[in-house]
Image: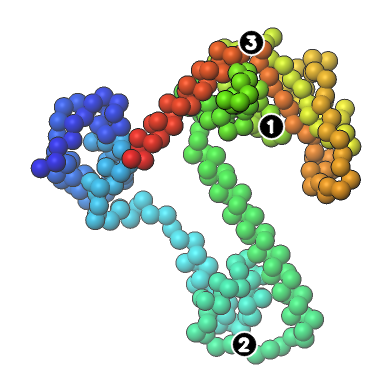
Amino acid sequence: MTEIRRRPGDGTGGLRTGTTTFESLREQAISLRREGLSLRQIRDRLGVHNNNLLNSLVKGEPPPTWTKRPNAKDDLRAKARELRLQGMTYDEIQVELGCSKSSISLWVRDLPKPDRRRSPEEASAIAKRGWERTLEVRDEERQRTKREAAAEIGALSDRELFLAGVGLYWAEGQKSKPYARRERVIFVNSDPDMIQVFLAWLDLLGVEPERIRYRVMIHESADVLGAEHYWADQARVDHAQLQRTTLKKHNPKTVRKNVGEGYRGCLVIGVMDSAELYRRIEGWWSRMAVEARRRNA
């Protein structure tokens, strides 16, 4: 008989304490599953917050029908077959539905082919419209997925922002090396959203605005002044507060893709007297890595 010892906040028992058996938990989980509860509801009901354990408890039990997402392609397949029976070509169905011709082919290959009624030029024009419609539908799906994902995040708690900031800095910020000891918080990025998250994180940590320095880094052939004003607005500081811009010399042999009106270089954010903060960041990150290894064990 397998025993599961529960401790507050250990990731397996939530707020419950004491000792229970895997068999006892599985019996309860299966009963709740058959009542129509989702994994999230079973997790909250039993206080089991370890995903691997939770999945083991309900292994072999099918999820309730209401938790299954409808398959949009089932409707597309039915519509494609209907249009094919009406005599439409793959290109025409693609224009109508926006799905790929490879999918249409799989869905309707058992149906009779329509008679050719168009010249090669007309068929080519329809094919072009079909591909344009496919790209349009794909973009709509892409944007819908992004909106749904954004809604899943909701409001960030202080702890969530704290952990996100630690990971963000360790991925994008300056790190001290054994051969080059530089314990100072410096963050460089060209993504304005990344800059906003980092600045919100510094504010959460209580870093005073007067300790923060800003500098633009950009190619000399770009709109330097425009970039400086853009980053000053992003950081909500006066343009005069920016330090001297670092200009990258243009190499005529290099074909750059970061050109045009949207190119504004990078913003460099440095925190003065930040050796202690840097060490804490390194400590925070090392603990997060330890916890990740523990979960993967």
Crowding near pointer 3: few (<14 within 10 Å), some, many (20+)?
few
Amino acid at pointer 3: Asp
* Quadrant where the N terminus is found in the figure: top left
Pointer 1 or 2: first along the chain: 2
Please tell me which residue is depicted at 30% across the width and 53% down the height of the picture.
63
Amino acid at pointer 1: Asn
Of the pair 247 and 115, the residue shown nearer to us = 247
What residue is shown with label 1?
A: 189
Q: Residue 114 carries which label?
A: 2
Please tell me which residue is depicted at 57% across the width and 22% down the height of the picture.
201
Label 1 to label 2: alpha-carbon separation:
56 Å
Residue 287 higher or lower than 135, as above or below: above
Q: At numbered mark 2, what does the secondary structure look like: helix, strand or loop?
A: loop
In the rendering, at what x and y percent does residue 253 appear? 86, 48
Q: Tell me, yes or no, if residue 69 can be seen here.
A: yes
Q: At numbered mark 1, what does the secondary structure look like: helix, strand or loop?
A: strand
Q: Is residue 132 left or right of residue 44?
A: right
Q: Is residue 193 left or right of residue 64?
A: right
What residue is shown with label 3?
A: 273
Of the pair 231 and 175, the residue shown nearer to us = 175
